[in-house]
Image (tube, rainbow, N blue to C red):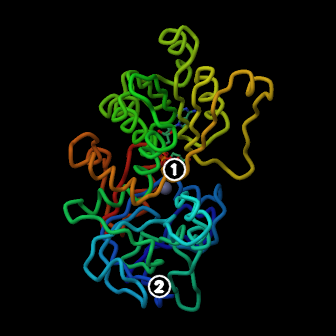
Amino acid sequence: MRAAVLHRTGDKTLEVKELATTSFGPGRVRVKVHKAGLCRSDLSAMNGVFPHPAPFVPGHEGAGEVVECGEGVTHVKPGDRVIICWMPPCDECPACKAGDSHLCRSGYANLAKPGFQDGETILPGMFGAGTFAEETVIAGYAAIPVPNDVPYEIAALMGCGVTTGIGAALNTAKVRPGSSVVVIGLGGVGISIVQGAKVAGAARIVAVDPTANRRELALKFGATDAVAAEDLDPVKQRLTSGFGFDYAFEAVGRPVTFRAAYDAARPGGTVCLVGVGARTEAPELSMLKMVSSEKKILPSFYGGGDVRRTFGTIIDLWRAGRIDLDSMITHHVPLADVNEAVRQMETGEALRTVIDI
Ligand code: APR
Ligand code: ZN
């Protein structure tokens, strides 16, 4: 079978080549990948912003069909349609037992588990998933079944960006009806936050991005206002008399945008950090200001809740036409052209590129 390989951290291009899968066995499943999405975190793992062992097979958004179940896997069977989940709930570790299955300890342990073999070399799939491949072997509980009316490409997007964004709005920040919201960064994650805030009944959704076409898109997905970063302060003055927004979301992953979100939130409001920055980067905040303004800083990881429940919510909203996931897919490429998907993300021309496998 064929897969895309990043040979060295920092390499710009992936090589699509013949590989074998490995480590199939008890508790694991083999999935034929049908659709994968390219997410910003793939680039972060490729360029070293996130530490990830290389070589590896990128791709952590994906959906496909179960082809083989290892011993003990009973919740799915061959032929089932599944989302390949990169932070799956094992239901047995302390995090799962504490009700925070999106922080699953076994999921963490799975992140760099080998899934592929290239001659003598054993290599992992990104975050234990490795969806830029015709076939991947994952932990059994990482294969989350979805109904057959959910197209593979929609299921693929739910594997990361959409769940991260909608979950941040609904599960973590719990946006209230009638509230005012600002979303900084309008990629797949930020646009999903906009959609989540709309579903929650926010009265104002201000979308912020330096790119004009992203701002235009955000208006189509439910934002009421869209501005460039330098116009955020004047908008805060105009809309809130300078007091600030009830909720401010950061969906870029940089200290400067976190700071912008912090400053945009009203005293007593919520600052929801969704973007993932580099390990060494940290925002600077005043101890005095943090306490005296009582802004609640709520980081949100992978949708901030049990993914099975969030997937179900997203499917219901999508079926009812209350969120638009189809229009988030702006481009398609075949696996052989995966480097074109990387280019489309780097130039910002694609909101989400789906890789047809
Ligand atoms: N202010 C506002 N927006 C910005 C700024 C800025 N200073 N700098 C960049 N952006 C915008 C980009 O123009 C782009 O539209 O942030 C957006 C990021 O979108 P994508 O690159 O598509 O990233 P996405 O997949 O949405 O992920 C966003 O969430 O999961 C994490 O690792 C991921 O940190 C990343 C973040
Ligand atoms: Zn992702």
- Front position in the image: 269 or 272: 269
- Front position in the image: 274 or 353: 274
Q: Kindly identify the amino acid type of the residue bearing the numbered disc 2.
A: Gly
Question: Would you say 9 lies left or right of 30 here?
Answer: right
Quarter of the image containing the N terminus? bottom left
Distance between mark 2 and mark 1 Cα atoms: 26 Å
Q: Which residue is mark 1?
A: 304
- Front position in the image: 128 or 294: 294
Among the two numbered marks 2 and 1 on one chain, the one whose residue lies closer to the N terminus = 2
Secondary structure of residue under mark 1: helix
Q: Kindly identify the amino acid type of the residue bearing the numbered disc 1.
A: Gly
Position above or below: 93 against 117: above
Question: Which residue is painted at 53% across and 68% down in the image?
Answer: 126
Horizontal and vertical percent position of residue 65: 29, 75
Secondary structure of residue under mark 2: loop
Position above or below: 355 against 222: below
Question: Which residue is painted at 54% across and 70% down in the image?
Answer: 6
Horizontal and vertical percent position of residue 265: 58, 24
Q: Which residue is mark 2?
A: 27
Horizontal and vertical percent position of residue 248: 54, 30
Question: Which residue is painted at 27% across and 75% down in the image?
Answer: 80
Position above or below: 224 against 275: above
Horizontal and vertical percent position of residue 71: 42, 91
